Image (tube, rainbow, N blue to C red):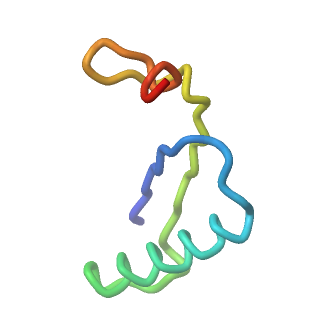
């Protein structure tokens, strides 16, 4: 059973998440030759203050 974790910044709509999981599920099914009934996707919405790169919080970038 493929289990995928998707981390992204919060703020996406439910419709965007629906599209994401549909397209990711299709890709996993094609790549692994499995049915959609075995694919699991966990979406982790993160606030920008919970992610950093190069020592800078994402919330502080592009200010």
Quadrant in the rendering for residue 14:
bottom right
Could you tell me which residue is drawn at 55 percent across and 28 percent down? 48
**Left or right placement of residue 26 versus residue 47 in this view:** left
Residue 34 location (% of width, % of height):
37, 83
Q: Relative to 41, does residue 6 appear above or below in the rendering?
A: above
In the picture, the quarter occupied by the N terminus is bottom left
Residue 19 location (% of width, % of height):
59, 76
Depth check: give the residue in front, 58 or 14. 58
Could you tell me which residue is drawn at 39 percent across and 21 percent down? 52
**Left or right placement of residue 29 versus residue 11 in this view:** left
Residue 54 location (% of width, % of height):
25, 19
Q: Please state the total of marks drawn on the protein image.
A: 0
Residue 58 location (% of width, % of height):
45, 26
Depth check: give the residue in front, 24 or 12. 12
Could you tell me which residue is drawn at 71 percent across and 71 percent down? 15
Could you tell me which residue is drawn at 57 percent across and 42 percent down? 44
Quadrant in the rendering for residue 26:
bottom left
Q: Relative to 4, does residue 46 appear above or below in the rendering?
A: above
Depth check: give the residue in front, 44 or 51. 51
Q: As drawn, which residue projects farthest toward the front?
A: 63
Q: As drawn, which residue projects farthest toward the top?
A: 55
């Amino acid at each position: 059973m493929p289990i995928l974790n998707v981390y992204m910044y919060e703020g996406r709509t439910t419709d965007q998440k629906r599209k994401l999981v549909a397209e990711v599920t299709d890709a996993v099914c094609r790549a692994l030759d499995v049915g959609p009934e075995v694919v699991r996707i966990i979406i982790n919405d993160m606030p920008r203050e919970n992610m950093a790169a190069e020592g800078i919080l994402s919330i502080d970038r592009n200010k």
